Amino acid sequence: MNFTAQDVKELREKTGCGMMDCKKALSASDGDMEKAIEFLREKGLASAAKKAGRIAAEGIVDVIIEGNVGAVLEVNSETDFVAKNVEFQNLVSVIAETILNSNAKTNEEALSLEVNGKTINDLIVEKISTIGEKLSFRRFEVLEKDNDQVFGTYSHMGGKIVSLVVLSKDNELAKDIAMQIAAMRPLYLDRTEVPAEVLEKEKTILKEQAENEGMDASKIEMVVNGRINKYYEEVCLVDQGFIKENKMKVSKYVESKDSKIIKFVRYEVGEGMEHRVENFADEVMKQING
């Protein structure tokens, strides 16, 4: 083998093609990067390769549940115009169902899953050719529950935000908590989940803020601790005020229903990604002209 894992990574970044396709291309090209790119184009992956450098931060986040297993995933497109395309939405549904019925743990494993003799990566590449935009499978997460536990889901803005939560019981409460998660953007379930390095960074920022405010040095620690509690109320689900009963924290409300939050996931399309500047007229002309 005349290529390394780094070569595969580089080829993926240059072409937007899947890992297995890149391995085949490098193997067939004796490790030559340029020949590998040509190989991928000759195999019908040219349009995907040409679009690889584009920004794709729109798309859909979706949630699917079967029995005791639920999956949340994000598939990106370049424009919201395509995100509303039925062909794209059907692709997302196929990917979601395939992942839900698999044991995939990583994106590479998910992209290698087969649907009627084609991998998910193959299906995405085909749709890039027919839809005319860069499409990418960004992430997924699978949650499992016990028989006596319940799922709660919420989808907002037609697939722009979705949440999935597992509670010990109470279906109606689970729906409310899923709505809370979608609306209030918690990052963690409780304080124990906040990484130590994240907490220390936040404390450093708050300390600097207090110092810049000219606060008495003897009071800074007390003020920082108070503001850290406010930080927890923003980022920890159980510490947030419940949206339907704001004077009561989520933890207390759930306890009042004799239930418990086990775990959750929240996805929002394009969060943390660079977004392209849209010109709607140009996008319409691109769709018309192919």
Image (cartoon, rainbow, N blue to C red):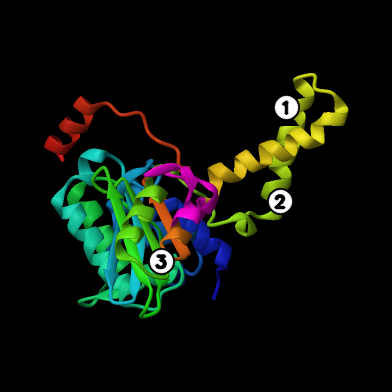
What residue type is disc 1 on?
Gln
Query: In the image, is 129 to the left or to the right of 277?
Result: left
Q: Quadrant of residue 244?
A: top left
What residue type is disc 2 on?
Glu
Foreground mark, 3 or 1, reads 3
Residue located 55% across and 46% down the image: 235
Q: Where does label 1 land, which residue?
A: 209
Disc 2 to disc 3, C-alpha distance: 27 Å
Q: Point out which mark residue 238 bears.
A: none
Disc 3 to disc 1, C-alpha distance: 37 Å
Circle 1 Cα neighbour tier, 10 Å, few/some/many (<14 / 14–19 / ≥20) = some
Start and end of the magenta stretch?
Answer: 237-253
Disc 2 to disc 1, C-alpha distance: 18 Å
Residue 64 in view in this figure: yes
Q: Where does label 3 land, which residue?
A: 166
Residue 89 rendering spot, x and y as whole percentages: 20, 54
Q: Give yes or no for residue 239 being in the magenta stretch.
A: yes
Whichever of labels 3 and 1 marks the residue nearer the N terminus, that label is 3
Q: Quick one: 175 or 85, which is closer to the camera?
A: 175
Residue located 71% across and 51% down the image: 197
In the image, residue 162 sits, relative to residue 257, either above or below, namely: above
What residue type is disc 3 on?
Val
Q: Secondary structure at mark 3?
A: strand
Foreground mark, 2 or 1, reads 1
Residue 126 rendering spot, x and y as whole percentages: 23, 59
Q: Where does label 2 land, which residue?
A: 197
Whichever of labels 2 and 1 marks the residue nearer the N terminus, that label is 2
